[in-house]
């Protein structure tokens, strides 16, 4: 009897242990760490102004035509290098060639009439000197001759007009460069003013930017600059070569161009983002700025924040107050400092305290 009671007690204890274990199957199991990249916020000091810009070709042309017609042939594609005067596009010109033939025939006819009138004029002039014809007769012949000369001039101008239109059916490169965009295909109907190709001057580049009105008095033509080209992983120097004196049509933004060295031009491509560092000649007017990448910003309801990796490599959410955007960065007015390790955007879900692995 006692043996039976002991067995029953052991059985109950075993069931209790199993039940306890099964109720916490994941106890002690740690969630997988997230691989992230970090960076430190950019800080612009009182002695420096930071604005965004772009690498641009010194000369850019949007190729179009003044005539309507079907595109017969396109000799280039995007990325092709072209030389000045090279034929790029041919537009069907059958109707203009017919008009050219008509204008040519009209000119030949007008010249023939003029020659006949010139002979009459010379003959009547001689007869008038011999007093064989009256002043009135000579005057009538002279008027006829003058009229025929005017008709020849009109015919020549008509032919010149048709030929100038024909020139727009054989579109040539205005300068040597690279085709950066092709917006039409063979067989498309081209209309006057419609963009067909974009051509940028090869090798000749500068950096362009728009300067806010509160900074424009602090910079001058000839100032030296430092430029970060993140896409090419290079830092280059430049000199302000142009600064617009007016922002009437640009909403308070003053256009600026920065010239760069020939050696630096070979490293760049048009369209690359440029971070421009300018010396501030009136430092008391500009407060230091903290900048983070826009890709790091997260939004929850009406709040914005960034995740920061702490000393134990755990993600911590910092709520921040944001200012203006500058290129791919945004000014942080409060919420982080320059020593915080800001986490770049990640597809993995982050939350306060989640372990992260810092990667290069």
Image (spheres, rainbow, N blue to C red):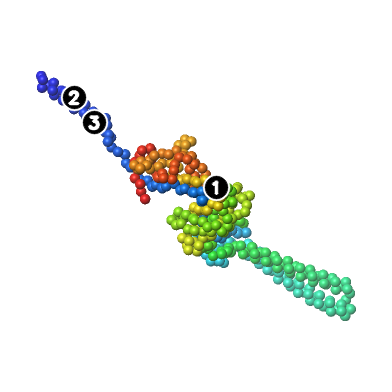
114 relative to 285, above or below: below
- Distance from disc 3 to disc 1, alpha carbons, whole Å, reads 67 Å
Question: Can you identify the residue that label 1 sits on?
Answer: 284
- Label number found at residue 12: 2
Question: Can you identify the residue that label 3 sits on?
Answer: 21
The residue carrying pointer 2 sits among few (fewer than 14), some (14 to 19) or many (20 or more) residues within 10 Å by Cα, namely few
Earlier in the chain: of badge 3 and badge 1, it is 3
Residue beneath the point at 85% across and 71% down: 139
Earlier in the chain: of badge 2 and badge 3, it is 2
* Rendering coords of residue 153 (x, y %): 73, 68
The secondary structure type at the circle numbered 3 is helix
The furthest residue to the front = 284
Could you tell me if the residues under marks 2 and 1 are in contact, i.e. CB atoms within 8 Å? no
- Numbered-mark total: 3
Q: Which of 245 and 121 is in front in this view?
A: 245
Earlier in the chain: of badge 2 and badge 1, it is 2
The secondary structure type at the circle numbered 1 is helix
Give the left or right position of residue 252, taking residue 29 as reference.
right
- Label number found at residue 92: none
Could you tell me if the residues under marks 2 and 3 are in contact, i.e. CB atoms within 8 Å? no
Residue beneath the point at 52% across and 57% down: 224
Residue beneath the point at 56% across and 53% down: 219
* Rendering coords of residue 256 (x, y %): 57, 55
* Rendering coords of residue 223 (x, y %): 55, 57
Residue beneath the point at 79% across and 68% down: 147
- Distance from disc 2 to disc 1, alpha carbons, whole Å, reads 80 Å
203 relative to 340, above or below: below
- Distance from disc 2 to disc 3, alpha carbons, whole Å, reads 14 Å
- Comparing labels 2 and 1, the label whose residue is closer to the camera: 1
């Amino acid at each position: 009897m006692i043996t039976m009671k002991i067995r029953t007690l052991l059985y109950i204890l075993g069931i209790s242990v199993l039940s306890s274990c099964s109720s916490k199957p994941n106890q002690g199991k740690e969630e997988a760490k997230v691989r992230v990249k970090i960076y430190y916020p950019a800080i612009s000091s009182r002695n420096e102004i930071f604005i965004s810009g772009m690498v641009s070709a010194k000369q850019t042309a949007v190729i179009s035509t003044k005539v309507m017609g079907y595109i017969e042939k396109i000799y280039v594609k995007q990325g092709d290098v072209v030389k000045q005067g090279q034929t790029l596009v041919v537009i069907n010109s059958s109707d203009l060639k017919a008009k050219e033939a008509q204008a040519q025939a009209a000119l030949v006819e007008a010249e023939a009439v003029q020659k006949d009138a010139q002979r009459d004029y010379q003959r009547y002039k001689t007869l008038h000197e011999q007093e064989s014809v009256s002043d009135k007769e000579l005057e009538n012949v002279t008027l006829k001759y003058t009229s025929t000369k005017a008709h020849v001039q009109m015919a020549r101008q008509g032919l010149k007009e048709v030929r100038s239109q024909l020139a727009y059916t054989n579109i040539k490169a205005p300068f040597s460069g690279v085709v950066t965009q092709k917006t039409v295909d063979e067989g498309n109907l081209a209309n006057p003013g419609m963009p067909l190709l974009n051509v940028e001057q090869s090798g000749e580049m500068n950096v362009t930017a728009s300067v806010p009105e509160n900074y424009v008095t602090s910079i001058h033509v000839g100032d030296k600059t430092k430029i970060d080209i993140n896409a090419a992983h290079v830092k280059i120097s430049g000199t302000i070569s142009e600064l617009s004196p007016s922002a009437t049509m640009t909403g308070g933004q003053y256009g600026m161009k920065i010239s760069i060295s020939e050696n630096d031009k070979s490293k760049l491509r048009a369209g690359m983002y440029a971070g421009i560092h300018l010396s501030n000649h009136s430092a008391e007017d500009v407060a230091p700025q903290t900048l983070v990448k826009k890709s790091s910003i997260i939004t929850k309801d009406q709040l914005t924040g960034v995740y920061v990796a702490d000393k134990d490599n755990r993600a911590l959410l910092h709520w921040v107050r944001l200012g203006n955007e500058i290129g791919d960065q945004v000014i942080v007015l409060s919420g982080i400092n320059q020593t915080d390790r800001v986490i770049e955007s990640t597809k993995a879900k982050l939350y306060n305290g989640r372990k992260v692995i810092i990667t290069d």
